[in-house]
Amino acid sequence: MPRCTSFVRQMAATLALGACALMAAAPASAQNNQPITLNGLRNFPEAALRGTLVVTSATTASINGNAIRMAPGMRLLSPDNSLVMLHTMTGQELTVNYLIEYSTGMLLTAWILTKAEAAQARAGSNATTVNYNTGGASQ
């Protein structure tokens, strides 16, 4: 006596077909990875600063001529928001918006800018990056 009715078999086949359809649709949605933009320009965090970045080694760089260490997870993003390998940009001057990690003062993220993005006003890198004093002078 069969225990599996035709209804149960039909439901199992329908669920399997639905799962296959979902797995086939996932790669298609991943191909549309265009950055979120407003009028063709990317949105950057308000804390991002503007500067000229030169990667000098795997762990160091300079921003506007000032040496800075890069955080272990430092990300350099191209104008289309794809990840750029740092060793391919060694020695090149890049106009970027960048974020400094608050707790360590290391370079955390940098976005290579398009000409339109570089034309927008943004604060430079002359901002204070540390907030401590040596206690020598009274405040």
Image: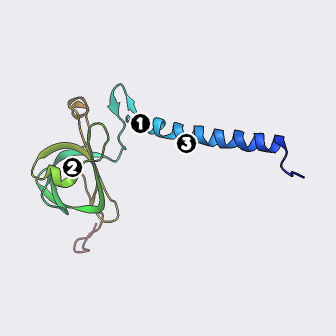
Please report the residue visible at 25 percent of the width from the left and 56 percent of the height from the top.
128
Residue in the image at 62% along x and 43% along y: 19
3 or 2: mark nearer the eye: 3
Query: Quick one: label 1, few (<14), some, or many (20+) residues within 10 Å?
Result: few
3D distance between C-alphas at marks 3 and 1: 14 Å
Which residue matches tag 3? 23
Hey, which quadrant is residue 132 in on the image?
bottom left
N-terminal of the pair, mark 2 or mark 1, is: 1
Compared across the picture, whether 93 is left or right of 113 comes to left
Crowding near pointer 2: few (<14 within 10 Å), some, many (20+)?
some
Q: Which residue is mark 2?
A: 125
Q: Earlier in the sequence, mark 3 or mark 1?
A: 3
The residue type indicated by label 3 comes to Met
The kind of residue on which mark 1 rests is Gln
Query: Which residue occupies the foreground of this view, 74 or 7?
Result: 7
Q: Which residue is mark 1?
A: 31
Q: Nearer the viewer, residue 99 or 19?
A: 19
Q: Position of residue 103 (x, y in %)?
A: 34, 64
Spatial CA span between label 2 and label 1? 35 Å
Drawn side of residue 38 relative to residue 129, left or right: right
